[in-house]
Amino acid sequence: MNEQRRQILEMLAEGKITADEAERLIDALERQRPESPQGTASRPRPRPKYLRVVVNSADDSGDGPSRVDIRVPLQLLRAGVRLTSLIPPQALTKANAELTRSGVPIDLTELKQQHLEELIEQLDEVDIDVDDPDSSVRVFCE
């Protein structure tokens, strides 16, 4: 908190000014302060809406290059995570056993909304290496 704002709040606490006066003074301070580049950098980024997977590859069959562009709504993933809370525990146990048997060791009981949001934050820009020098794969949120 800057010094001027603190002084205004102290005057308000001591009864030297009213709440309306304090509000007007603080508003005046806000208008005087120039917009700093840090202020724009600290704004929260908009919540991503899509998970994009883009694959560009050179086609050896002579048909030319191929491109795959998949856009998955993240709301679908978020809704799926919320739906796991409605699945009975016995069904989750069976689903986990089948997933493990199929080689996908995921515990659906541990899937939580905050984990998905953390994953989305980390997917800001992920590049995946492909052995083919003429191909590229990008996974990112937008």
Image: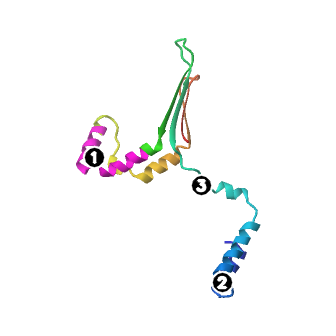
Residue 72 position in % (x across, y down): 47, 38
Outermost residue on the front side: it is 20
Q: In this view, does 103 lie above or below 10?
A: above
For disc 1, the marked residue is: 92
Mark in front: 2 vs 1: 2
Residue at position x 51%, y 41% in the image: 50
Q: How crowded is mark 2: few (under 14 residues within 10 Å), some or many (20 or more)?
A: few
Residue 137 position in % (x across, y down): 54, 30
Magenta region includes residue 50: no
State the SS at label 1: helix
For disc 3, the marked residue is: 44
Residue at position x 73%, y 71% in the image: 29
State the SS at label 3: loop
- The span picked out in magenta is 77-99
Residue 86 is left or right of residue 14, and the answer is left
**Could you tell me how far apart the alpha carbons at marks 3 and 2 are, in whole angstroms?**
33 Å
Number of the label disc, if any, that sits on residue 3:
none
What type is the residue that disc 1 sits on?
Leu
**Could you tell me how far apart the alpha carbons at marks 2 and 1 are, in whole angstroms?**
59 Å
